Image (cartoon, helix red, strand yellow):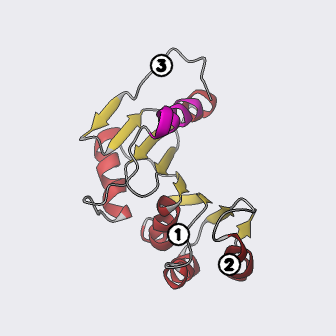
């Protein structure tokens, strides 16, 4: 993906943990997979963030997911608020382990109104994901490829939570 935007990088990077782009109205919070950086392979997360900001005008925060930095989602959102200001509506995008974090912990952050959870690993997290999603009051969508490792398990378990799966 390439953007025609004149931007080429995050407006602000905080300790290599958060890549931030200011915007209006809403915050799109992207949590990457295990041991992922705010840039991703070939800058994919930076490009996604820039494109979301260009198309919607929303603020975007990309959060790394390093093994040695285990924060709770609520704490991460507070850290982003400190940098970007208070946003009353958050759209959460979680990839792999970042999706599991959202599914398990989003209910603790009432401003998260919608979630897109991509290829959430369920084999070791199923009960925690089920418990977290039962408590979450917003809208959520789980997305898997038919060849993803947990596709069959997700197809069986996720609809029972009243959540969409594609």
| Rendering coords of residue 140 (x, y %) | 64, 64
Label 3 Cα neighbours within 10 Å, binned few <14 / some 14-19 / many ≥20: few
Q: Quadrant of the C terminus?
A: bottom right
Camera-nearest residue between 158 and 106: 158
Label 1 Cα neighbours within 10 Å, binned few <14 / some 14-19 / many ≥20: many
Considering the whole magenta stretch, tell me its main secondary structure.
helix
Q: Residue at x 39, y 29 (%)?
A: 10
| Rendering coords of residue 88 (x, y %) | 47, 51
In the rendered image, residue 88 lying in the magenta stretch gets the answer no
- Looking at the rendering, the stretch of residues picked out in magenta corresponds to 40-51
How many numbered marks appear? Answer: 3
In the rendered view, would you say 137 is above or below 44? below
CB within 8 Å, label 1 to label 3: no
Q: Which residue is mark 3?
A: 7
Camera-nearest residue between 96 and 148: 148
* 61 relative position to 152: left or right: left
- Give the label on residue 103, or none: 1
Distance from disc 2 to disc 1, alpha carbons, whole Å, reads 15 Å
| Rendering coords of residue 75 (x, y %) | 30, 60
Label 2 Cα neighbours within 10 Å, binned few <14 / some 14-19 / many ≥20: few
CB within 8 Å, label 2 to label 3: no
Q: Which residue is mark 2?
A: 153
Q: Residue at x 30, y 40 (%)?
A: 83
In the rendered view, would you say 25 is above or below 139? above
Q: Earlier in the sequence, mark 2 or mark 1?
A: 1
């Amino acid at each position: 993906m390439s953007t025609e935007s004149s931007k080429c990088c995050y407006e602000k990077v905080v300790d290599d943990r958060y890549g931030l782009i200011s915007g209006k109205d809403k915050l799109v919070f992207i949590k990457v997979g295990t041991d992922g950086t705010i840039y991703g392979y070939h800058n994919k997360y930076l490009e996604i963030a820039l494109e979301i900001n260009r198309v919607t005008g929303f603020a975007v925060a990309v959060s790394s997911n390093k093994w040695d930095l285990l924060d709770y989602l609520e704490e991460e959102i507070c850290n982003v608020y400190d940098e970007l200001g208070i946003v009353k509506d958050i759209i959460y995008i979680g990839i792999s382990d970042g999706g599991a974090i959202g599914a398990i912990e989003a209910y603790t952050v009432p401003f998260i109104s919608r979630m897109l959870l991509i290829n959430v690993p369920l084999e070791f997290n199923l009960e925690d994901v089920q418990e977290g999603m039962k408590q979450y009051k917003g809208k959520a969508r789980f997305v898997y490829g038919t060849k993803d490792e947990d596709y069959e398990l997700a197809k069986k378990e996720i609809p029972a939570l009243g959540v969409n799966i594609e």
